Image (cartoon, helix red, strand yellow):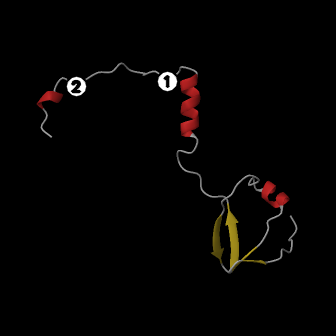
Amino acid sequence: MQAITLTIRAIGNSKGIVLPKPVLAQIGLEGASNLCLTVEQGAIVLRKPARSARAGWAKAAEAIAVQGDDGLLLDEFGNQDDAELRW
């Protein structure tokens, strides 16, 4: 992609830029509302935020439950010696 010139605009007491839709689409951020901003060697660098290690797990678990495939893999079992343990 060629370099483009953006206008820095006043936004209250701050300044901002508008990122063109094609730029956002190119990096997969069309619907995103957050970015990670760092300053590296005098340059402003914008990146996708890091995904949580368990991102999407809740939705996947719901899909499995809807299919009825969320049963226990092993039967429940107790430890016979648990009653003798002192906590």
State left or right for residue 74 relative to residue 11.
left
The secondary structure type at the circle numbered 1 is loop
x and y, in percent, of residue 34 in the image: 66, 60
**First-in-chain label (2 vs 1):** 1
x and y, in percent, of residue 59 in the image: 58, 36
| Residue drawn where x is 12% and y is 37% of the image | 86
State left or right for residue 25 relative to residue 64.
right
Q: Which quadrant does the C terminus fall into? A: top left
Which residue bears the numbered disc 1? 70
Compared with 81, 17 (above or below) is below
State left or right for residue 12 relative to residue 79.
right
| Residue drawn where x is 68% and y is 57% of the image | 33
| Residue drawn where x is 81% and y is 60% of the image | 23
* Badge number at residue 38: none
Mark 2 → mark 1, Cα distance in angstroms: 24 Å
Question: Splitting the image into 4 quarters, where does residue 50 fall?
Answer: bottom right
Report the front residue among 4 and 62: 62
x and y, in percent, of residue 18 in the image: 79, 68
State left or right for residue 72 relative to residue 38.
left
Report the front residue among 13 and 61: 13
Compared with 75, 12 (above or below) is below
Report the front residue among 20 and 10: 10
Which residue bears the numbered disc 2? 79
Assess whether mark 1 and mark 2 are in contact (beta carbons under 8 angstroms): no
Q: Which quadrant does the N terminus fall into? A: bottom right
Q: Amino acid at mark 2?
A: Asn
Compared with 87, 51 (above or below) is below
